[in-house]
Image (cartoon, rainbow, N blue to C red):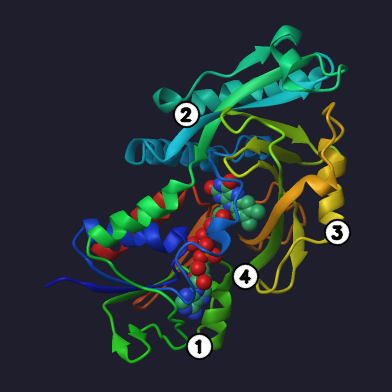
Amino acid sequence: MLKKVAIVGGGITGLTTALFLSKKNFEVTLFEKNKLLMETSSKTTQLIHGGLRYLESFQLKEVQNGLNDRAWWFRNFPNETKEISFLIPFQKKNIDFYKHFLGVKFYDFLAGNQNLSSSKIADYKTIEGFGLLPNFQKGIIFSDGHMKETLSQKLIEQTKANQVSLIEEHEINVLDSNGKVGNEIYDAVIISAGPWTKELLDRNNIFTKFDIDYIKGSHLVFEHYLNPESSAGFMLPDINKERYIFVLPTSKGTLVGTTEVPINHPNYHSINKFEEDYLIESINNYFVKKFKRDAIIDSYSGVRPLIKKGSNDFHNASRDFVIEKQGKLFSIFGGKWTTSPSIARKIVKMLST
Ligand SMILES: Cc1cc2nc3c(=O)[nH]c(=O)nc-3n(C[C@H](O)[C@H](O)[C@H](O)COP(=O)(O)OP(=O)(O)OC[C@H]3O[C@@H](n4cnc5c(N)ncnc54)[C@H](O)[C@@H]3O)c2cc1C
């Protein structure tokens, strides 16, 4: 007999899990309180990546895992993903330059035969046309994955085609570890409610040993500073030289992000003036043509549900995930857009044994 599974939360984690389970012939119903892929999963920097910067904190396994999943997205959605190259500019070849060069080479190595274009050093001649201030004479170029806008829709279509029952605008308030969701009983219940997972468990008096740090991240979209047809962006140390900011071309405009602001609750988040100033000041350290506030055409914010580890270094905090099993209930904490296939694979394994 088919196993009946309920998934609560229709972000990327829930949707990819639904797709994987349906391919293994589970009978899947997914409940989403709003619209599919409209919360955290639509507020990203649009990267399909292993996370180059996590190498700085030696999260080798997680980076490699992300790179494997990057390859999965490229294989399964070749028309909805594309390669993007990023330039990290430098004023001179100092220790930092060589450290970064080793980092990108190691990133290529971890990707193995699934690597995209090899990373390389860019001399002044190469970076001349990038619009940078003249003191930036050197650069390092590496490649990563970029989601096209069609990716979300294609994923939803595939999931529907696989007979998953997708129920939008249906909030689940009552569930338990015996398989109950509302008035129905399922063989397994998966909570993939992103930043709302802990809150949903609390509401149902289900104890969890995990807690979440809610870290708001915001983006600005400027009118086209970078050619929308180009597949080259920038990874830039911020104004405090503590973290990186991405600047990349999209069809809508030039995307700039992101920030890290701890908040108390995942609802009601939006960009504030401080974040706007921080993003604009950081990138204007690099370009001849300044990014101006009146060229902002859009902005958006999302909340990273990071597993609480007791550190305030959110930039380097692990984006790894855990799945907590209690009876028939499987609660997912953490993860990244890119690594949702890893989460889905693990759920399939747990439900198949
Ligand atoms: C600023 C920012 C930039 C990022 N950039 C990247 C990036 O470039 N690449 C990358 O790989 N990752 C990125 N991430 C991480 C990535 O966005 C998240 O890891 C991922 O989107 C989380 O997906 P999710 O499905 O777990 O959560 P969500 O997308 O939030 O989905 C959870 C869903 O559950 C629903 N829900 C909640 N409660 C209930 C309920 N009671 N009943 C029914 N439905 C419910 C919500 O409405 C929501 O749709 C970024 C995150 C942020 C915040």
Nearer the camera: disc 4 or disc 2: 2
Callout 2 amino acid: Ala
Q: According to the image, label 3 marks what residue?
A: 273
**Mark-to-mark CA distance, 3 and 1:** 37 Å
Total labels: the figure holds 4
Q: Could you tell me if the residues under marks 1 and 2 are in contact, i.e. CB atoms within 8 Å?
A: no
Residue 35 vs 144, above or below: the answer is: below
The residue shown at (87%, 50%) is 277
Q: Can you give x and y, in whole percent of width and height, for residue 173 in the image? A: 47, 87
Q: Can you give x and y, in whole percent of width and height, for residue 49 in the image? A: 53, 39
Asked if residue 333 can be seen in this view, the reply is no
Q: Can you give x and y, in whole percent of width and height, for residue 143 in the image? A: 56, 27
Nearer the camera: disc 4 or disc 3: 3
Residue 185 vs 2, above or below: the answer is: below
Nearer the camera: disc 3 or disc 1: 3
Residue 88 vs 262, above or below: the answer is: above
Q: According to the image, label 2 marks what residue?
A: 111
Q: According to the image, label 1 marks what residue?
A: 204
**Mark-to-mark CA distance, 4 and 1:** 16 Å
Callout 1 amino acid: Asn
**Mark-to-mark CA distance, 4 and 2:** 31 Å
**Mark-to-mark CA distance, 2 and 3:** 38 Å
| Earlier residue among tags 2 and 3 | 2
Judged from the image, the quadrant occupied by ligand 1 is bottom right
Callout 3 amino acid: Lys
Left or right of 25, for residue 243: right
At mark 1, the secondary structure is: loop
Q: Quadrant for residue 312, please give it.
A: bottom right
Q: Which label was assigned to residue 211?
A: 4
